[in-house]
Image: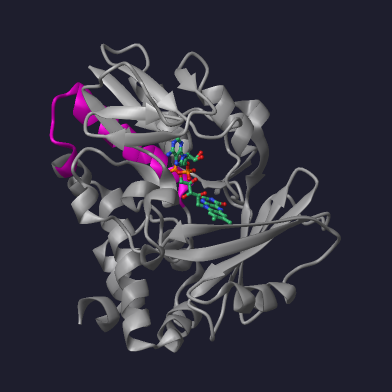
Amino acid sequence: MRIAVIGAGPAGISLGYFLKGTKNEVTIYEGLDTLGKKPCAWGVLKGIENYVTIPKESIISEIKGFKIFYDNKLIYDIRGRENLGYIVDKPLFLEKLSEGLDLKRNSKVQIEGNKIKVNGKNEGEEFDKIVLANGHYSLSKDLTIPAIQFITDHEIDNETVEMYFYSDLLGYGWVFPEREGSKIGIGGYANVDFLKEKLKTLVKGNTRAFQGARVSDFGVLEERLNGNYIGEALGTVYAITGEGIRPSIITSKIFAESLLEEKDFKKEFKKSKLYWTLQKHAEIIQYVKRSNNIKALEKVLMKSDPDMVLKFAMGDFDKIDLLKMFGRMIFG
Ligand SMILES: Cc1cc2nc3c(=O)[nH]c(=O)nc-3n(C[C@H](O)[C@H](O)[C@H](O)COP(=O)(O)OP(=O)(O)OC[C@H]3O[C@@H](n4cnc5c(N)ncnc54)[C@H](O)[C@@H]3O)c2cc1C
């Protein structure tokens, strides 16, 4: 099968990677000249090793601790026992994963039926399948929230990530280590001016860059489960934490396996734990948004066992965990 993949983020590149050496010929089109340019804090949680080997040179640090803050007050400090994930150099990670793939950079695509236009010109070839892996760029504003971050020279323990939640913002802040300094950001249901003000309370050190992008916050879009979308374009971001790299890669794995085994992607994806956990995150955010009750999340954060909070954040939970944490909020 001739497959065109539009977008060379984690979803598009990993789909090419999973289909490499199979009977499928995959061409990946990327609008930009460099991979991994989209603003991102580069945190990838554990479990990713079951899908791809992370090239050693792209690992900036291993995450061994999580600090969770509420209204800038430390409420949980979870650390030490095991690897919880990685901070990766995302451009390098994607470059390494893309080795041996047919990747066309500087190639902005428009789709017309089963043909594509690249940089405004018809691409001669026809494809059997066109897969959109173009991330939040294909999502409308009402399905995404703004997220902004500073890159600063503020040094933090490179094995610890910090997550921030607030009583007056449905969203999240973060301080993640990077090669030299840290990435300090915030995203949520608010305008950028409000986010900037809140970010001022987090930011430390001399800032080297300021970046922003939108991020999906509505879970998986059922109408896009038609075999033409993967990754964030499909909505595969954990709504409560904004984690999108690992879920996008897992989605591509399920997509590739469905293709190779001639199974229906929609059915296979909906059977997966990933789908269920993504949707639960999204349902909780939508519940809180509808009821305008951010305090409900505060109660859950304050009363839950820290290990459970971590499991929930990482998408490693089942119905019983959910019932223990959220009770009627989710099953009522
Ligand atoms: C500020 C911020 C911080 C974040 N931090 C984290 C984090 O620490 N950890 C985490 O897991 N997630 C994080 N996320 C989310 C994560 O970045 C995304 O969910 C993830 O990159 C999605 O991967 P993707 O491949 O689906 O899409 P993307 O990474 O968005 O890739 C899509 C690609 O498609 C290309 N493209 C778009 N349109 C076209 C076109 N017409 N033709 C050709 N190419 C096109 C784009 O240039 C881009 O390279 C963050 C998001 C933001 C905004």
Does residue 224 appear left or right of residue 30 in this picture? left
- Asked whether 60 falls inside the magenta stretch, the response is no
Tell me which residue sits at (50%, 59%) in the image. Answer: 214
**Position in image of residue 13 (x %, y %):** 45, 29
Q: How many numbered circles are shown? A: 0
Residue most extreme to the right: 206
Does residue 58 appear left or right of residue 151 in this picture? left
In this rendered view, identify the residue nearer to me: 322 or 43.
43
Decide: is 19 above or below 54: above
**Position in image of residue 264 (x %, y %):** 13, 35
Quarter of the image that includes the N terminus: top left
Residue 35 image-quadrant placement: top right
Decide: is 198 above or below 143: below
Residue most extreme to the front: 121
In this rendered view, identify the residue nearer to me: 237 or 209.
209
In this rendered view, identify the residue nearer to me: 323 or 15.
15
- Asked whether 257 falls inside the magenta stretch, the response is yes
Main secondary structure of the magenta stretch: helix
Can residue 196 be seen at all in this image of the molecule?
A: yes
Residue 200 image-quadrant placement: bottom right
Tell me which residue sits at (62%, 82%) in the image. Answer: 71
Can residue 75 be seen at all in this image of the molecule?
A: no
**Position in image of residue 284 (x %, y %):** 33, 73
Decide: is 163 above or below 208: below
Residue 250 image-quadrant placement: top left
Quarter of the image that includes the C terminus: bottom left
* Magenta segment boundaries in residue numbering: 244-266
**Position in image of residue 182 (x %, y %):** 74, 54
